Image (cartoon, rainbow, N blue to C red):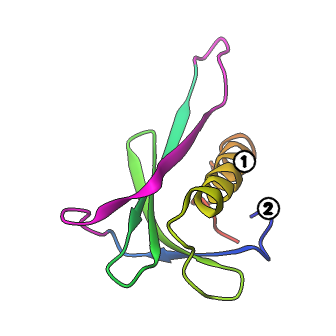
Amino acid sequence: MSLAADYSVSSIPHFNARGLRRCVVPGAGCSNGTDAVGSSASTADFWCGRDGVVLMRITWMGYNWSFQVLDGSGRPIPDEKEPMEELAFVVAQELYRWMTEDAADLPPFDD
């Protein structure tokens, strides 16, 4: 993932978001544009986990992957506008890279 030193993204089992609060920035997404085949869009939704960790669910082409996101030092990312906007920007960049380069071979954020 780009800016890997800034974030730690770990795969987790699917989580039930019922009862969880959405983060101040609720998500990010990207589209790889349109062409003869069509367009494709992927979204990442963010929730505040009960322990303060950002939980992220990525959806693309009917598939879902779940992750927890910490800062590069292993601490929870504050649910505040600036840090969450930075996370959303990095996630959108990584989604685009993944969709255009690795999607056929790897799940998102797989090293």
Spot occupied by residue 28 in the image (x, y as percentages of width and height): 55, 45
Q: Nearer the viewer, residue 17 or 59?
A: 17
Q: Nearer the viewer, residue 80 or 65?
A: 80
Identify which residue is drawn at 74% across, 47% down. 97
Is residue 16 on the magenta stretch?
Answer: yes
Residue tagged by mark 2?
A: 2
Spot occupied by residue 49 in the image (x, y as percentages of width and height): 36, 75
Q: Is residue 55 left or right of residue 50?
A: right
Identify which residue is drawn at 53% across, 40% down. 42
Q: Is residue 75 visible?
A: yes
Quarter residue 40 falls in: top right
Q: Is residue 44 visible?
A: no
Gap between marks 2 and 1 measured at Cα: 8 Å
Quarter residue 83 falls in: bottom right
Identify which residue is drawn at 71% across, 72% down. 111
Q: Around disc 1, counting alpha carbons within 10 Å, would you say few (fewer than 14), some (14 to 19), or many (20 or more)?
A: some
Query: Which residue in the rendered view is the most extreme toward the top?
Result: 36
- Secondary element at tag 1: helix
Q: Around disc 2, counting alpha carbons within 10 Å, would you say few (fewer than 14), some (14 to 19), or many (20 or more)?
A: few
Residue type pointed to by label 1: Gln
Please say if the residues under marks 2 and 1 sit with CB atoms less than 8 Å apart: yes
Identify which residue is drawn at 72% across, 40% down. 100
Q: Quadrant of the N terminus?
A: bottom right
Query: Which residue in the rendered view is the most extreme toward the bottom?
Result: 74
Residue type pointed to by label 2: Ser
Spot occupied by residue 21 in the image (x, y as percentages of width and height): 30, 62
Residue tagged by mark 1?
A: 93
Q: Is residue 5 left or right of residue 44?
A: right
- Magenta part of the chain: 15-38
